[in-house]
Amino acid sequence: MLLSLEVLLTLALCASAASQMPLGRPPLPHLGDEEVSPFLVGSRRQRGANGEEGDASKTRTFTPTNYTVVQDFFVQSLPGFNSSGFDPLTSSFGLIDRSPSRWTSFRHAVDELNRDADEHTAYKVFYVARHGEGVHNVAERVHGSSEWNRYWSMLNGDGNLTWGPDPLLTHVGVSQAERNTAAWAKEARAGVPLPQSLYSSPLSRAMSTLEITWRDLLFSKIAPVVKESLREVTGVHTCDKRQTKSYIHKHYPSFIFEVPFSEHDQRWSPDWRESDRQATFRLQQALNDLFATDTSTYISITAHGGAIGAFLRACGHPNAATLGVPTGSMLPVVIKAVDHRSAQNELLAGGQSIAAPPRPTRVPRGPERRSVEL
Ligand SMILES: *[C@@H]1O[C@H](CO)[C@@H](O)[C@H](O)[C@H]1NC(C)=O
Ligand SMILES: *[C@@H]1O[C@H](CO)[C@@H](O)[C@H](O)[C@H]1NC(C)=O
Ligand SMILES: *[C@@H]1O[C@H](CO)[C@@H](O)[C@H](O)[C@H]1NC(C)=O
């Protein structure tokens, strides 16, 4: 059964409100719906307050302060992994166990981690997907990266190709997304845990990729959610400017929006570009948000090269510096989150945006506390 948009929006509002709430809040009322929904926040079949065992596939929701990558499952998470020639779509997404029962064992192991975890710890599996090839990827190839960054990325097109704002997938990009679907279908026959929630960047190339990948397999059960914090590193490059909320709603009617979601793009500026540090901080906030509002264990996000790099840095991935996800590909990452008094929140924010106009200099009084423009 598909939840109505109205119900989902109400739930989204609840989810947004819930993110502000502390640990141990009362569960939302049972909705009488047995489908997996991305918004069943703190709901049914969790471990109860007395610690009695519930559905081990559901994790708790809270705001953790320390993320680490569990290195036991995927080759790409082993320190020193050399990604040269590695294609996750033809190698069971990099799962180390290649036996026929590999995904059943994986699921049991993840369930066990959550079952044995203390009340401050949760484990989630993120399926981190990158959009298929977009027109801007072709343009960057045609003009070369340095000319692209110096000049062409700031324009909407070159007379031959149009990439701004918000470029669409090329035919190659569509095929790449279809290849991703085929890889999922193959692993699904071997029992891979399918995502219980789907999130996308608000840029068309990501939403189209998500749609192609999951429409037939999951859209009847799960409404994908557009999430601003998953967008590509923003500013200056026209390919990273999004469309209005109305446009997205019209062209991607199956998608629902996180709350709040602004009509116009408030994060893109022609004058400044987010720094890597700022993007890392933004993706760390996205992780906080997902761990605080979504009880799903298996979560799919569809994003971008730069945003995925920031995601890998935010969760402390051992190969964040070298691991890339090619267009249209996907990598699983098992993340352990700890929310505990002893966990320290490492401040990743700070620094000035790239290409930002110079700020007026003023001697700050005491330690400088400037919020990040995102
Ligand atoms: C990774 O493997 C490739 C091909 O085997 C090799 O050429 C390259 O030097 C390796 N890179 C590192 C950092 O070891
Ligand atoms: C547009 O395409 C034509 C024909 O392939 C080529 O000669 C021209 O250089 C291209 N223009 C730009 C700006 O790349
Ligand atoms: C984060 O967790 C890891 C592993 O549990 C631990 O070694 C590290 O000290 C923690 N970091 C902080 C900042 O708490």
Image (cartoon, rainbow, N blue to C red):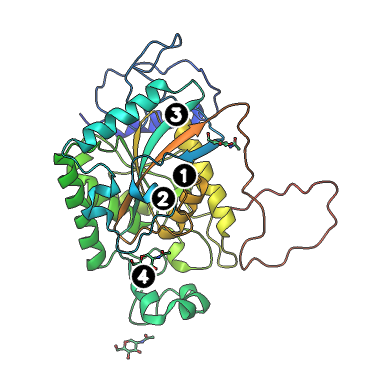
In space, the residues marked 4 and 1 are separated at their CA atoms by: 27 Å
Return the disc, 3 or 4, that comes first in the chain's sequence.
Answer: 3
Residue 224 relative to residue 16: left or right? left
Contact, CB < 8 Å: mark 1 with mark 2? yes
Q: Which mark is residue 137?
A: 4
Which callout, 4 or 1, points to the residue nearer the camera?
4
Which callout, 1 or 3, points to the residue nearer the camera?
3
Return the disc, 2 or 3, that comes first in the chain's sequence.
Answer: 3
Q: Amino acid type of disc 3?
A: Ala
Which callout, 3 or 4, points to the residue nearer the camera?
3
In space, the residues marked 2 and 4 are separated at their CA atoms by: 24 Å
In space, the residues marked 2 and 3 are separated at their CA atoms by: 33 Å
Name the element at disc 4.
Answer: helix
In space, the residues marked 1 and 2 are separated at their CA atoms by: 7 Å
User: Residue 64: x, y in percent?
Assistant: 53, 32
Name the element at disc 2.
Answer: helix
Which residue in the protein does label 3 denote?
122
